[in-house]
Image (tube, grey):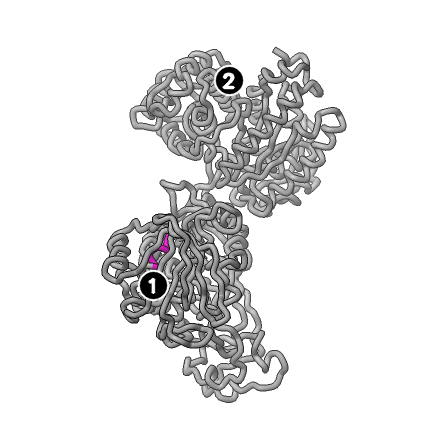
Amino acid sequence: MSIKENEEFRPKIVAFCCNWCSYAGADLAGSSRLGYPADVKIIRVPCSCRVNPMFILRAFEKGADGVIICGCHPGDCHYSTGNYYARRRMTLLFSLLDYVGVEKGRTRVEWVSAAEGVKFSATMNEFVEKIRSLGKNVRLEDLRCRN
Amino acid sequence: MQRIGVFVCHCGSNIAATVDVKKVVELIKLEPGVVHAEDYQYMCSEAGQEKIAVAIREKGLTGIVVCSCSPRMHEATFRKAAEKAGINPYMVEIANIREQCSWIHKDMEEATKKAVILARAAVAKVNLNAPLKPGESLVTKRALVIGGGIAGIQTALDIADAGYEVDIVEKTPSIGGRMSQLDKTFPTLDCSACILTPKMVDAAAHEKINIYTYSEVEKVSGFVGDFTVDIRKKARYVDMDKCTGCGVCQEKCPSKKAPSEFNRGLNKRSAIYTPFAQAIPNVPVIDADYCVKLKTGKCGLCEKVCQAGAIDYTQKDEIITQKYGAIVVATGFDVIKLDKYDEYAYSQSKDVITSLELERIMNAAGPTKGHLERLSDGKAPKNIVFIQCVGSRCSDNRGKSYCSKICCMYTAKHAMLIRDKYPDVNVTVFYIDVRTPGKNFDEFYRRAVEEYGVNYIKGQVGKVLPQPDGQLLVQGVDLIDNKQIKMEADMVVLAAAIEPESSVRKIATMLTASIDTNNFLTEAHPKLRPVESPTAGVFLSGVCQGPKDIPETVAQAGAAAVKVVGLLAKDKLLTNPCTAKPDELLCNGCSTCANVCPYGAISYEDKLINDHGIRETRRVASVNSALCQGCGACTVACPSGCMDLQGFSNRQIIAEVDAICR
């Protein structure tokens, strides 16, 4: 893919945000008017531990170019330990994905608290930038799903 | 398939200025299941809610999508509206097109496109929603207040006056907190102890208030209405029931080398001590680090002199387990450590002190009996320099980015009190800005300048240099006259930033209450729910939420108490119906889900299962919906995929993923 094409490339990015910290952080980014690209679409989940690896595989299958999971900082989980489960599961899943050709940069876990609007916006900007540099994801995509 | 109505809110111009709401309505009508779509200026208004009700009635809607602000803002509003109009409140989903769309995007085409996608995802989810019914849980009519400063005392008094039992847990040997260390209070200059001690006595005497001093919260479990808390009552080595508070033990104690916490380490105290004369309870504790008897087994003098026979060297820490309906955090603040600010020579000279130390020096019960004197040589100072914003409003990472809020006022107070008592002492204040919003605050500051002749210099101090003769050379800059200043001082007082008490992080973790990067506890909403934590049943009082002065703290303490009373007044609470639910046909009883459940909500039972005609007894998971908090950990852990979370089911989330990636 040429650089020019890359500039016009608008990735599809799914962000799973836990209800207590990161979703509130995203709201704070919004009310503070801290922008990030519209490519990011947020799905609210009660906790980062609700994110089933299946959801991430499904996203890539349906044509997502990047998936990010945001939860409370370690130790601050609303459900005490949920984010630890998420961290372990995702570590394993991401290395598997990397092995099958979905580069590590396309998947990410980030801790964003309810007070970190700035961090949320910065993280999303950075992540989108990264996905744009990686270009379209071709692995795992079910070509029958293409429009 | 549901019959879905989509309602797109303009939010005045908040959404409509960036998102083409008409276009969203037009495109969302094409989605499967959508039978009605409309836009309106303010969906949350009464007229807006009425539109939803009318559409439910006329179009026979079974599911609702509101494209508006964050669900954290108005999900409850729209759920209530739907319920009133006769459909299950959990058939409502919100597409957040304000905080997560219109407010962060500038390009209308792009924002509209995103709004449509977010709406599609919500429609896809609602299509799979099922009516849910919240359960009920009982409310324990007892509140816990963590911290026994003015915030905690006031909160406890207000809750107790409303007729509910309150326990205060205070980690030091006495209640009173920071306010008990202050000499006078601004802007009225009344004596801090004179207004605080009656409240301490009221709290101690109140039949509904139970005070655990020298105690810490060790463990918290449960949820709103039904918390179970372990409190560690540290060994006092003094029997609280027998002690008469005569004080002889403290006089006779031979070990008098412990730094006095109450006097900020400026003088020493005995190993057996009460922190200050008006302490409540007036029962001393033995500091095991300094007590000769506890360390070596010899001495035992206090036991000999105690006529009440209250000394008990064998006392052990005690764990008290108690149930509470609500918990208030009132852990207060401390002054920051000044090791990163060595340019002010705090560690090098005894005559460079913090304002809180000055407070103790000015106090009649303090280390100098209230005489203003240099700690190095006991001489009366002639020139005193105050330095403002030490660690506050800091742009580098040495200090705090926030304004500590109280320093401008207490410095004006100190300056005024010194000039009043010692008119020949010169007082100079270096400041960045003087911030005095508050009733009678600016008048107070102006009195310091105009009536008391305090010399205010706008500018920062670069360095304080201790001289060989014991004087302090202050080098600063006057920003108004734009010149360098060098002046000699006998004493330098630093208005050090305040920060939340160090134990707050541990407490926040136990309560799963969110905390910001400065360790202040986060409110449920910065404007509309300032005394509640996002964690239900946890409330905030005083400086643990953000810097405040005494009147603000007392006001917030009352507000937190009202919220607690509002909760405790209920007999039952509705529980979150978004709980885990196993598919018994798929469950193989492996116990994986129970192992990850943080609430112990999952158990196993032998149940007669009819699996496509095969009837057999199997061991299957069973979720106690009163205990389940709906985190979803089990849903992912389940190897056979039998566990699902109601309201956030696998199919619902996948439908959202599909809609977004389409």
Q: Residue at x 28, y 51 (%)?
A: B438
Residue under mark 2: which chain is it in?
A: B
Q: From the top left corner, tell me how far across and down residue B296 is, in percent.
A: 63, 82
Front residue of B389 and B656: B389
Q: Residues within 10 Å of mark 2 (few under 14, many from 20)?
A: few
User: In the figure, A133 relative to B221: above or below?
Assistant: above
The local secondary structure at tag 2 comes to loop
Q: From the top left corner, tell me how far across and down residue B529 is, in percent.
A: 38, 43
Q: Residue at x 42, y 32 (%)?
A: B75
Q: Looking at the image, is mark 1 or mark 2 nearer the viewer?
A: 1
In the image, residue B26 lies in the stretch drawn in magenta = no
Q: From the top left corner, tell me how far across and down residue B283 is, in percent.
A: 44, 76
The C terminus of chain B sits in image quarter: top right
* Amino acid type, label 2: Met
Front residue of B98 and B659: B98
Residue indicated by mark 2 = B1
Q: Main secondary structure of the magenta part?
A: helix
Segment tinted magenta in the rendering = B405-411
| Contact between labelled residues 2 and 1, with CB atoms less than 8 Å apart | no
* Amino acid type, label 1: Val
Q: From the top left corner, tell me how far across and down residue B490 is, in percent.
A: 41, 68
Q: Residues within 10 Å of mark 1 (few under 14, many from 20)?
A: many
Residue indicated by mark 1 = B427
Whether labels 1 and 2 belong to a single chain: the reply is yes
Q: Is residue B398 at all visible to an observer of this figure?
A: yes
Q: CA distance from mark 1 to mark 2?
A: 78 Å
The local secondary structure at tag 1 comes to strand
